[in-house]
Structures are given as C-alpha cells and as structure tokens.
Image (cartoon, coloured by chain):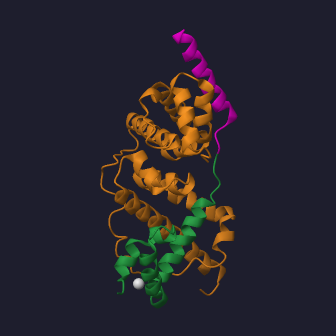
Chain colours: A orange, B green
Amino acid sequence: MTTLDMEAEAALLDRAKTGDREAFWELAAGSVDPIYRLALRLMKREEDAEDVVQESFLKALDKIGEFQGKSRFNTWLHRIAVNQGLMKLRKRRSDVFSMDAPVGGGEEGDAHFMELADFGSSALEDLESSEAATVLESALEELPIDLRTIVVMRDVNRMSNDEVAQALELPLGAVKWRLHRARTILRDRLGEYFAERVCRTGETG
Amino acid sequence: MTMKCSEVLACISEYVDKEVCPDSCSAIEEHLAKCSHCRAQVQTITQTVTLVRRMKNCCAQKDMVIRLQRRIVRIDRGKL
Ligand SMILES: [Zn+2]
C-alpha cells in the first residue's frame, strides 16, 4: 500500500505544505483505495463512502500545514476519514457510535471454553465459494462499528497495531483487545457456518 | 513456568500475528503442545484472519479520483 519510506514521505510533505499539488498526490495516491474501503465499511453505502473519501482528502489538503508528520500520512488520512465518517453517521443517526463506548459484543468471548472444531482443511478454498464469502461479508457488516473499523484497518488495509492506535487515538492495549474481540466474533460466525456445512454434506468432523 | 489457558487466549491475536516476544512465544507453544482447546482456538483464529485477508476488496473508481481532483482544482482557482 504505502511504499514510500519515511524520508521520501517527509520530503513530499514539505513540498505538499507549500501548496505543491503533485507532491500531495504522490503522498495521497496510495491511500485512496484503503480509505475508500474503510469508508465503505463504515457507511455501507457507496455514495456516502465516496463523500467520506472526498471530504477526507479535501480536509487533509486544508489541514496539511498542521500535520506534524509524527505518523505516516496514510495513518493520518485514516484518522481524518474515521472522523468524517462518524460525523456523517451521526447526522444519519442510523448508527450510534463512540470510540470510547464499551467494546461491542459484551464480554462473553472472554472465557470461550466451548469445544471448537477447526473449520476443516477445505475452509480456505471454500472462501472462494460465494456462500462462505457471503457469510464473512455479513459477519463483518454486523460487527459493532468500533470493532469493524479496527478489523478493516488491521486485516484489510494491513496497518500495524501502532498505526491503528494512532489513527484512532486509542491506547495500544485497547486496539489489541478490540481486534481480538472482533476476530473472535468473526471466527464464531464462520465456525457456525462451517459446522453447519459439515452437517449438510455429511462429512465426519 | 506454565501458562494458563486464559493467559494464552488473551494474547492469541498477537500470537497469530507473530507479534509476541520470543519468550512468550515459546511459553505459548509449550502450552499449545499440551492443550487441544487452545490449539483449536489458535487454528480457527488463524483461519479467520486468513479468510478476512483474502476477501475481495473493492477499489475506488477512477471517476471518484477524477471528481476529487476537479474539486481541488476548483478550490485552488477560488483562492487565486
Ligand atoms: Zn489451553
């Protein structure tokens, strides 16, 4: 995704701050797809996602003078995009959200001592099956928004835990815990699907 | 020193991401060798992460970038 090293990024940032649009695009281009993916997962509607992307990049352009370069540019853009997305969601009022709210999904995953079968060796090839992909899609969609945001940044956009913590202004421990919760919830949903599939196809597990 | 299941489960995500320190890693592996419950946890979380990473990802349409660039040009003109 972001292939620029820190030095190249710092040099581009200096130029971008003087109003050099070419430098701005060089900095920003690699973040367009990740920001769009994040926005789409937040907003769940293409037109709203596009608005968030546009507003985020315009905001970055407007505020670039204030950006200290303490995080990666991509991380900073994620931060802006999350804020833009949340603002829009609040206006839409269909999805209530606060990053400080208790972690979604309760605590029941804490002591998850039910016996777990592994999904089976065919699970990974199975994702190519549209059915399993649909299960994962809806499981992700149903995740509480704070957890969903973290999964997208971490496992889809491949940011580090530190970058996610910076982008969300959360302590590192909170990011790790929420990621763990999110993955556990997704795992349980997929587990249900694969267990059911095993029953249907009459395989012995 | 042996780890308890709850301790292993607490750092399972980091273990799957290979982000635990070497000492914790060997303690976890020592536990996993003996505990099928935690092994299943590690395996299913690993599979889940792999599946999420393999999901088809949408890309921004070229039009979107063009619209954004046009807006920036308009803003810049406005400033002149
Ligand atoms: Zn155990």
- In the shown orientation, is residue A5 left or right of residue B28? right
Q: Which residues are magenta?
A: B59-80
Instruction: Depth check: give the residue in front, A36 or A47.
Output: A36
Determine which quarter of the picture holds residue A45: top right
Specify whether residue B65 is painted magenta.
yes
Residue that extends furthest to the bottom in the rendered view of this protein: B34
Give the residue displayed 65% in from the left and 78% down from the top: A121
Specify whether residue B53 is painted magenta.
no
Give the residue displayed 53% in from the left and 81% down from the top: A117
Instruction: Depth check: give the residue in front, A191 or B20.
Output: B20
Residue A179 seen by the camera: yes
Image height check: is B19 above or below B56? below
Give the residue displayed 47% in from the left and 25% down from the top: A62
User: Ligand 1 lies in which image quarter?
Assistant: bottom left
Determine which quarter of the picture holds residue A65: top left
Residue A129 x, y percent position in the rendering:
69, 65
Instruction: Depth check: give the residue in front, A16 or B45.
Output: A16
